[in-house]
Amino acid sequence: MPPAHPFDDDKLKEECGVFGVVGVTDAANFVALGLHALQHRGQEAGGIVTYAPDHGFNSARRFGYVRDNFTNQSVMDTLPGEIGIGHVRYSTAGSKGNTQLRDVQPFFGEFSMGGAAIAHNGNITNAAALRRELIERGSIFQSSSDSECIIHLMARSLQRDIPERMKDALRRVEGAFSVVAMTRTKLIGVRDPLGVRPLVLGKVADGWALSSETCALDIIGAEFVREIEPGEMVVITEAGVTSHRPFNARKPRFCIFEHVYFSRPDSVQGGRSVYETRRQIGVELAREAPVDADLVCPVPDSGTPAAIGFSQESGIPYAMGIIRNQYMGRTFIEPTEQIRNMGVRLKLNVNRALIAGKRVILVDDSVVRGTTSRKIKEMILDAGAKEVHFRIASPPTAWPCFYGVDTPEREKLLASHMSEEEMRQHLAVDSLRFISLDGLYRAVGEAEGRNNAEPQYCDACFSGEYPVAPSDMIERGFQVKTAAE
Amino acid sequence: MPPAHPFDDDKLKEECGVFGVVGVTDAANFVALGLHALQHRGQEAGGIVTYAPDHGFNSARRFGYVRDNFTNQSVMDTLPGEIGIGHVRYSTAGSKGNTQLRDVQPFFGEFSMGGAAIAHNGNITNAAALRRELIERGSIFQSSSDSECIIHLMARSLQRDIPERMKDALRRVEGAFSVVAMTRTKLIGVRDPLGVRPLVLGKVADGWALSSETCALDIIGAEFVREIEPGEMVVITEAGVTSHRPFNARKPRFCIFEHVYFSRPDSVQGGRSVYETRRQIGVELAREAPVDADLVCPVPDSGTPAAIGFSQESGIPYAMGIIRNQYMGRTFIEPTEQIRNMGVRLKLNVNRALIAGKRVILVDDSVVRGTTSRKIKEMILDAGAKEVHFRIASPPTAWPCFYGVDTPEREKLLASHMSEEEMRQHLAVDSLRFISLDGLYRAVGEAEGRNNAEPQYCDACFSGEYPVAPSDMIERGFQVKTAAE
Amino acid sequence: MPPAHPFDDDKLKEECGVFGVVGVTDAANFVALGLHALQHRGQEAGGIVTYAPDHGFNSARRFGYVRDNFTNQSVMDTLPGEIGIGHVRYSTAGSKGNTQLRDVQPFFGEFSMGGAAIAHNGNITNAAALRRELIERGSIFQSSSDSECIIHLMARSLQRDIPERMKDALRRVEGAFSVVAMTRTKLIGVRDPLGVRPLVLGKVADGWALSSETCALDIIGAEFVREIEPGEMVVITEAGVTSHRPFNARKPRFCIFEHVYFSRPDSVQGGRSVYETRRQIGVELAREAPVDADLVCPVPDSGTPAAIGFSQESGIPYAMGIIRNQYMGRTFIEPTEQIRNMGVRLKLNVNRALIAGKRVILVDDSVVRGTTSRKIKEMILDAGAKEVHFRIASPPTAWPCFYGVDTPEREKLLASHMSEEEMRQHLAVDSLRFISLDGLYRAVGEAEGRNNAEPQYCDACFSGEYPVAPSDMIERGFQVKTAAE
Amino acid sequence: MPPAHPFDDDKLKEECGVFGVVGVTDAANFVALGLHALQHRGQEAGGIVTYAPDHGFNSARRFGYVRDNFTNQSVMDTLPGEIGIGHVRYSTAGSKGNTQLRDVQPFFGEFSMGGAAIAHNGNITNAAALRRELIERGSIFQSSSDSECIIHLMARSLQRDIPERMKDALRRVEGAFSVVAMTRTKLIGVRDPLGVRPLVLGKVADGWALSSETCALDIIGAEFVREIEPGEMVVITEAGVTSHRPFNARKPRFCIFEHVYFSRPDSVQGGRSVYETRRQIGVELAREAPVDADLVCPVPDSGTPAAIGFSQESGIPYAMGIIRNQYMGRTFIEPTEQIRNMGVRLKLNVNRALIAGKRVILVDDSVVRGTTSRKIKEMILDAGAKEVHFRIASPPTAWPCFYGVDTPEREKLLASHMSEEEMRQHLAVDSLRFISLDGLYRAVGEAEGRNNAEPQYCDACFSGEYPVAPSDMIERGFQVKTAAE
């Protein structure tokens, strides 16, 4: 299966997207479209569950792209009904690199008052402890996914209806989560008290939709209504939406990396255009770290909006110095050792005629391991560039995420053990500058920058300040940041 | 199989790419990489032939992408040897929409002095007549491809070696062709006398490569040496390159649409950067057809360089007003009629927050049937744009191509029966302007514009002036342009 | 997937075969071979679970034949370890005709003291009631299979080790079952108190094997040790076999249809050669229902041993009057209506030259719906037979089985509403005779015939006397036999 | 793909079956059924060609079983028309073990007077010389199959219609062949002058059928009309059958091995029931080579009719001492070395309870390499047999066949270098006897045995007397039998 982004292996990866709909004919078709629009949030596998009075609950779970699995009439015919939810995933905490189909969400459980299905974006930080407790009491887990804890907690709740059981269950769960769930008649959406992961509500004809991002409302022609609020649970039937507050109130801290990289540029998060935010990051970068050069080139495709902003602020012309191959895919067999940077060449090619003899500013969204940045720099120099200047649209990524994002171990993050100048030397470029944390906050609309006493976003990957203690990880030996760090 | 370009169904399509290599270990791996870089020239199928002294000639021909077929060790192991050629194709004249594997090139023939394989980019305009003659003499055709004529003409030639037989055969052939062929020891490249289709020569380690475009030399780390000249045949062995001139000399007329759309922006054709030419088209367009507006947005991805040029010349900010879905693919089942423009939404989404309330210039590479332009305009208006202005980076496409490009029948071309103003009304946009033919010639470096007495390029799709009479088509009733038209 | 028997659609079908092994290198390879030898007991799907200290529990579950799924090195490499169990299935009570992969056994559960996997041949007659109770208590079922109840009962047991939890669970279960299970170190086998379904123990090198039939011991070169006794549980480690008696003692009643049809002729059940028993049924039939004729022909392949016995006792020559096509498979498209008996012709052909003008005795194992018998009779007459006499190697099948065999609803069984003479008229043959119930008992070695007061076998399908009340079925409205019937 | 016969690797294999039909609706469905019935003559691949006025000639060629490829509505829909031919093949002289789809028949050629397709059972003994000549003249071969020569000879014929061109072509061909061919309106059948390979004519409704064997007439409900005579060509239209005699008359010599093994037992060849001939071989064997024993057991399945005959003549009881696994297939991974005779165990199991302590006569159809016979003997002894006596239903196979049968090289044939007694010692059995050549001739109805001056059949595999000189093979160094041998 081809990765969609040329450097998927050197990026942080969102682990999931969720989508649900109620009150529309052939709900599964809507869910398939919604998941297709959310494919960038998870390419490994996808699943859909629907319910129809005469057919009960039905599900289909498949590895691979939504477009390859859920466009087939014979598959879609097995998913009748006017209510349905779906999930795309990259990989969960449970089974990195060895996912089995039984790990693919949504999960389903039959309770004495009827069935429910649930799909989850985020990560449960006390899942190991919960799992031990549940097994001790006689629950049989079918997957290695932490999200399955929620359904077992619900099965054991003493409450009488499913929304109440879900509240009961989620109060035991720590971490970051946006949940979309369904019963036979109700579509349910919940965001954790900090609102780390996104979830939005839309209106489509006589029905309603829930989605990780607004771009998936657009594809089904739904109107954006509002975000589900941090700590809110909505229960939606054809009659309308009711709002619940199952958790103690906390100050929200939305994931700032959704703005930097995860969300699609045509989505709106927290009332802000993601594209415009990224362009603004480029503007801030040009102010913070100007450099004299001939061309501003994005590293395709995610560096493009920031590169446009950088060009506009600096007045240096914007140009496509690196061309992406549209047909990326599996690994070719290397013909000989003479071809250096094979992996990169399959995905990108330098526009030699443009680059030769020029001083080039490359704008990229982030540096994780640094392996890709190094290869790109070499390609640019091979093509005859006179100078190479990296400008990075996020602060140095120095800490792993435990809230639903796939990050390398801390020691593999270049910024965990190198200063900006050490990284510049490591990459052997003429200059390397990251946007400052305050600059990033300004770009997302916080004119005063970061409020260090009470930060407005979750920025643990940059700051090491974790708003929810990663308790399972601490149990396994992870060292959280000390005051000294 | 997913199309690579969002509007493949409303574009002219190049029908083929060819690649060959000699004098390298495991030639097939190089050919696979070269074809991968040429995938935009043909996505339907691909084939590779190699020769090794102990294994003879071997071939593999498959439907689908190069990356999906020729990355498999077990397939590549069947293709040993230090010489090989390959082909990617969209569809040939013989069997539109119903290709069989036996129609996939390269074609192979066993002659009394040994075997030869041949791959062809272009179209033979007298193929039907040649085929009739060959069958009458007892040749058995295995495919419906016109290119097979060449191998049968070679089989019946009285010449004693294969290059001479190929000259003999190609002298009987009319039309546009760039041919890459191989014997047990020789790699052969030929361009037709007008040089309509491209072909370039590269040096890779101790060996040589032939390719439709320079971007495929880049991917294998080969150095660009020169173009094969119109009317030239090169015969390459490990010892070196010899040049032959089998045809009567004519004034060359390279296909101008290679600059507009077919070639990859990172290729160099006729000594000019394709990217830079396209950017320059945008500059010319901004001069010829300025308009007051807030944003210049490309129709992704092919309109991008011209949009950058338009923005730079006009000073109006460049912006990504339309976002492309990276995971395009098969057709989804439409959920309900309410979702208009379904096909477009799967591929593109308007960046609503950016577009709302703005006057937008959309830059696209061409208008063929006009169906896509119409849908894009509707999406832009639905998102709240105040005005929509189309600027097209090629003149009106009013005539079909018979030289290796897949074009609709003449009456389906919007420009065949509408003036620019009629098209504007048909598309219902605030303004619509195509670049002039002279403006296009200026952008490709002809400062004086088109030499109407003796045009410098083949521009039949715009002008209706066919440099080689399409004799099979005339026999079937096609009306060539009269003086009056 | 091709059915193995030409008339699978008009036969009673065994629903499962189980196999397990401990103490051998690469246990999965042994399990695959054992399941291959038991394929006749279930063709729909198969599964294998193994355990290795460094790799934990692993499983592979697939639709289709063992030979197609478990011969692949890459699959078998995922199943390391010296202990393993496996299962082949036709279909379970839960999901006739709509099996999903999650319904395929073995089932696995993680308990607080470690994991266990379990595979089951038979049927639980109180599964619906157990399932309701378990869901009420908070168990989440992952399959629609009744066998999953066992693993949930085990999860909730208060006992401290897995064999004790299994005893606890099985004491709640009613019905017929032969269970093979495994922990990290123990292979466990259990037969229900009546011993309805078979289970045998074998010795292979330094290890041990459990199997539904002895033919699967032969294929792995194991030595047959003994049968697991009705009501016995064996717990096997590399150290040896220990025997337990978890149930109250009852008089055994082995399934007599295992002798008639289910078991392979080269197996030994209850100390008797299945082949020899079937030959003996033919001898008894020839004594009970002689007829003057020219040829004795088996309906291939299951009627063959009884036909040999009939021929030997009657002195009428044995002949292959019906030839089976070795390449049976999917359904062909019927060319025209003129071809009657299409389905049968694909599988069988009458040996016309042999049959024409002859009086033919056809020996078949059973009559279920009678549809196939009718078609065969027509083919024989079409080929010119003078007379057709059916002799059936089992008594009339008048009652459904609820102990792990797939039977049509009672009203679809020809013998449920027709006498022998009515069936003869329905089939329109010259004579039709079934072996008597006493004759069948004599053939299996009960010289005195059936002990009606205390029958030696389960023969509910013939007699309607169910040794375990089918309580779920009674709840759904099934009428058990009354004294009058 | 599972082989149909348990010891395909130690049997002579028929290489092809042909079938054709004209004058019926949806001819392809009839062809598919006919090929299914002929599947035993070739399991590697199959092909069908049809013609319909509005759709022209269409073909489908696939690897694998007919039942898996030609039962699919979407495939069959591509084959419209009332005339069609088909072919199943094992492998041809051209490409043993490395067949490509382009080698799969029928072959098709477009001539100036229209197209023709041709399918061929047999072998052309002067194919190499013909091919050289045709390439020299400019023919391009698309396959490595010798049968393709026929279509090229036809393409170069000066005759005006296709049947005449076919006569012209076949007069240049040496060897054994039964050809089925078609034009747009004519179904054509030809047998070589010796009639080595079979071909029969049937009537089906208003149309006609040609087939290698009568069993394929039975499956489509066709009536057997007559055999095509050796040296005869029939041209069939809806109007009727006309007979031609294109060759000089010769005395026929039908392949005697069709009676021994190749043909299905329910076919009639040369007016004789194949089943009855095989039973009669058993009778002759019992007379020629009696032995005192307890049981007569066939080696399944091909030894069965001869074993029945042997039992009936000798009075020794017939029994199924060896049980065949119905689910043979791919190769399993061997668990350990302890399991000897792995390959055999997957396919066969000895009926231990029956065999133990007995003196057993095993009846098999032939001994080729002897490898299988040796393994079977070991299994029988392992099961406790007291004595093992082999009786073989054909004379020693000492010479390769060059007329369309796949035989090992001469030195690999056990009988090429061992006497009967040496073979007995090699197999280490108590006795081993082959039927005599005269005994075999008696069983096929020649009361006087073989006429050595002018043999009635082709028996080259036993006698080394080749009725057509294998000229290509002699050129490659094969030594034909000398008078002394």
Image: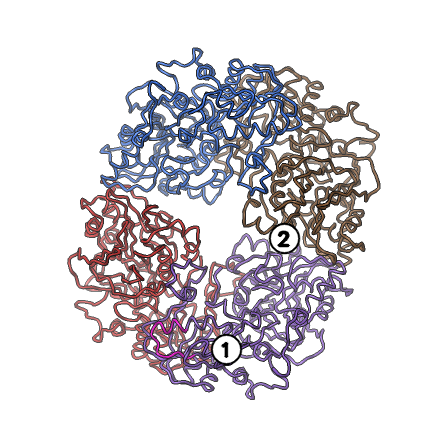
Chain colours: A red, B purple, C blue, D brown
Query: Considering depth in this image, is A409 or D222 the residue closer to the camera?
Result: D222
Q: Mark 2 lies on which chain?
A: D
Q: Which chain carries label 1?
A: A
Residue D367 placed where, x, y %? 66, 30
Note whether residue D381 is visible: no
Q: Label 2 belongs to which residue?
A: D58
Discs 1, 2: same chain: no
Residue B165 placed where, x, y %? 73, 66
User: What amino acid type should be assigned to the residue bearing mark 1?
Assistant: Ala
Residue A162 placed where, x, y %? 22, 48
* C177 displayed left or right of D268: left
Indicate yes or no whether the magenta region holds residue B382.
yes
Circle 2 crowding by C-alpha within 10 Å: few under 14, some 14–19, many from 20: some
Q: In this view, does B347 lie above or below C103?
A: below
Note whether residue D409 is visible: yes
Residue A353, numbered label: 1
Circle 1 crowding by C-alpha within 10 Å: few under 14, some 14–19, many from 20: some
The residues bearing labels 1 and 2 have C-alpha atoms spaced at a distance of 50 Å
Q: Which region of the structure is painted magenta?
A: B377-389
Front: mark 1 or 2: 2
Figure quadrant of residue B42? bottom right
Q: Is mark 1 on a helix, strand or loop?
A: helix
| Quadrant placement of the C terminus of chain C | top left
